[in-house]
Image (cartoon, rainbow, N blue to C red):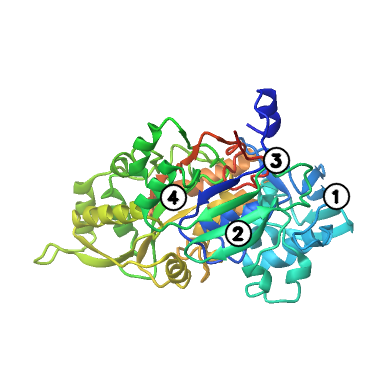
Amino acid sequence: MRASEAMAQGVAPRRGGTLQMMLTPEPPVLQIGVNQQGPTLAAAPKMFQGLLSFSSTLEPLPLLAKSWTISPDGKEYVFRLQENVKWHDGQPFTAEDVVFSITKFHMELAPRARAIFQLIETCAATDPHTVRIVLKQPFQPFLLMFDATAAAIVPKHLFDGRDYRTAPAVQRPVGTGPFRFVEWQRGNFIRMDRFDDYWKPGQPYLDSIIYRIIPDSQSRRLALESGQVLLSQASDIEPFDIPALRQRPNLEVNTAGWEYFSPLSWMEINHRVAPLNDPRVRRAMSMAIDRNFIVNRLWFGVGKPATNPVASTTRFHDANAKIAAFNVRAANELLDAAGFARNAQGVRFTVKHIPLPYGEIWTRLSEYLRQAMRNVGIALELESTDAGSWARRVGNWEYETTINFVYQFGDPTLGVERTYVSTNIQRVTFTNTGGYANPQVDALFQQARNAAVAAERQRAFSEVQKILVEEVPQIWLMELAFPTIHDKKVRNVITTGLGVHTSFDDVFLAG
């Protein structure tokens, strides 16, 4: 419910108040591009904006771009920008900031953006409030790249000519959003205050947003129950606490707002480590896992079992391409046939595993996987780490297995391809860090990327899904459905397909 809808229902937006939220885990920085982890992508859009936002059906909505046109051949995009927009330091926002953000900042820092923006032939400011982009070839899902989480527009005057990762603005972010950065006490809170020169008249309604850093999961639940915080998101609340919170009359539990992201979790495999480079081993490991148990017993029914690398909520998902069913006996037979005999202790081989350090539920998941692997003679040794070290180790290929979940961004070319094409094997988190390579898979993803019509893309994506479920480059576990839980006096929380990853300029606290 947007502010205009609230007015129509007799609920006038109220100006003022501080929205206390949580952020789990604490991110290293709040500069999108420099960091692409979930907490950064949730908090930073209060300060930074993209050209567009997206509805729950992934239709583009205006943001910093007030309008746009696409040429009949699908190669030229012209964006007309909002006027009278200012950066938080008072400098005017112009088309030059957009060109810099697209052609330099994100091209250097963001693997997902770089993979798509390399299709750009020219990107230029034709006047201070118009950007013209010409592609080398048509690319059907191009507009999906202009949300803040994919390509936040950053101030050219604070980054151009500097090291983008160490520029002062990384530590004190400056955006065009409704809230400006004020203070960050590490391990305690992040504070953002209303930007009085925000370009939308009369907005934002809130005076401030404060993100509380609360490491302990039970303390986070108590903070929400007691009203110390009014909103939780993503991994803030453990799934096993959700049933009780649903019963509280002052709280609303909402799993909408993830349509753009469609997060899919998997057991990440480093193909450089034997015997994980053997597809028979990966298939057997996958068959040893009871995904219904994971969804129903660990996540209490919030989410659904994964069936292949494309989430069922993402375009071009093929329901006919399915991973092998849970079958411990068949998994043991496959490992026996592959020549991996058990020793006197019943162990075939040992694999090291890093649980995802995003809360207790992920530790429980890894403990379940250890038990599941034990049932087929694989010893899974757990190694704990923190969020920053996890990102560094995965990015540097310093792992054997771990847990990961990755956003799909509405289209497999944007969110799925990056994990499986050999051209994206990089020492960067959220690329093909596993090192999987199959020329046929590369070719099919390229076909889908280049195809001009949806039917051609579907054929290529269907074929690639069939190959991937046979080779199991990653062991897909679950389509996640993160709940947003908030006090009912917090209005307009989920209004788009981006959920909490929006500006919150129309969020208000009802009296």
* Res. 417 mark: none
Q: Is residue 457 above or below residue 110?
A: above
Q: What residue does disc 3 label?
A: 60
Q: Position of residue 19 (x, y in %)?
A: 57, 46
Residue 47 vs residue 306, the one in the foreground: 47
Residue 113: image quadrant is: bottom right
Quarter of the picture containing the C terminus is top right
Which numbered disc flags the more N-terminal residue, 2 or 4?
Answer: 2
Classify mark 3: helix, strand or loop.
strand
Quarter of the picture containing the N terminus is top right
Q: Residue at x 46, y 32 (%)?
A: 250
Q: Residues within 10 Å of mark 4 (few under 14, many from 20)?
A: many
Query: Quick check: 145 left or right of 252?
Result: right
Is residue 42 in view?
no
Q: What residue does disc 2 label?
A: 112
* Front position among marks 4 and 3: 4
- How far is mark 1 from mark 3, CA to CA? 19 Å
Q: Residue at x 18, y 59 (%)?
A: 377
- How far is mark 3 from mark 2, CA to CA? 19 Å
Q: What residue does disc 4 label?
A: 236
Which numbered disc flags the more N-terminal residue, 4 or 3?
Answer: 3
Which residue type does callout 3 highlight? Pro
Which numbered disc flags the more N-terminal residue, 3 or 2?
Answer: 3
- How far is mark 2 from mark 1, CA to CA? 29 Å
Q: What residue does disc 1 label?
A: 83
